[in-house]
Image: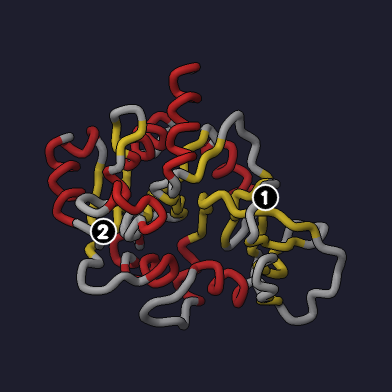
Amino acid sequence: MIKAFILAAGLGTRLKQLTCNKPKALVLLNKKPLLEHTILNLKSQGINDFIVNVHHFPDQIINFLKEKNNFGCNIQISDEREKLLDTGGALLFAKNKLKDAEHILIHNVDIFSDIDIKEFTANHIKNSALATLAVHSSNSSRKLSFNENMQLCMWKNIQTGEIKKIRNCNEKLSDFSFTGIHIISNEIFKHITETGKFSVIDLYLRLAEKHKIIGSKADYNYWFDLGRQETLKRAENIIRKT
């Protein structure tokens, strides 16, 4: 069984005035909230069980899903209104709601793409990975570095020079950017020792020394990080053409 965990708790600070009175998940793209686009896309690819985490204007998201009858899906809320837990902390906080899923697809609510989720999931299962990250080539300043087997080895910020590197990873590396879409085996919960607020990327980097944390090159016609207003406009043009 596969469940999707939609990360929708962020403050949406990059969208500024659009999120001063609503959560990022309810910002409109072609007259539909980002959350609706994400759910319907994943539903069209065979996923019907969802966890959605909330923090910023949480009741708006909860009420929106009720009004839409959960889009005919099974949707549970992971309520982080007391404290925003970052991506790793959010995953751990939702553990009890995810425990019956063999694999968990994690999807940022502000990512809009036509990545083939079925193929991505099948590759993850075929490779028996603890986690598989959908990656691509882009101009992002934050890069994930992988060896020839696409095993995660490093994270770096090109602008600041900050590096987080796995020990004993001195092979030739290739850099990619993270798409905001990843899938994990439920087994990962056995290896989480972090508590409170923490990044899931930091978790992956720690686990990659002894476990299979791999990258999978994403194939798509379009991919947008809708955390900025200019990309919202570009994505709307794509929708009009399809």
Residue located 29% across and 31% down the image: 32
The one nearer the camera, 126 or 97, is: 97
Q: Nearer the viewer, residue 15 or 95?
A: 15
- Residue 136 relative to residue 194: left or right: right
- Residue drawn at 55 percent across, 38 percent down: 223
In the structure shown, which secondary structural element does the residue marked by tag 1 occupy? loop
Q: Do tag 2 and tag 1 residues touch (Cβ < 8 Å)?
A: no
Q: Mark 1, residues whose alpha carbon is within 10 Å: few (<14), some, or many (≥20)?
A: few
Q: Is residue 37 above or below residue 237?
A: below
Label at residue 216: none
Which residue: 43% across, 37% down?
232
Q: Is residue 45 visible?
A: yes
Q: Is residue 10 left or right of residue 23?
A: right
Give the residue type at disc 2: Val
Task: Tell me the residue that label 1 is attached to.
Answer: 139
Q: Which mark is residue 54?
A: 2
What is the spatial separation of the Cα atoms under label 2 and label 1, in whole angstroms? 29 Å
- Residue type beneath disc 1: Asn
Whichever of callouts 2 and 1 sits on the residue coming sooner in the sequence is 2
Q: Position of residue 101 (x, y in %)?
A: 39, 55
Q: Give residue 210's position: percent from left, percent from top.
A: 67, 75
- Within 10 Å of disc 2 (Cα), the crowding (few <14, some 14-19, many 20+) is many
Asked whether, in this view, residue 224 is left or right of residue 170, the answer is left
Residue beneath the point at 39% across and 77% down: 197
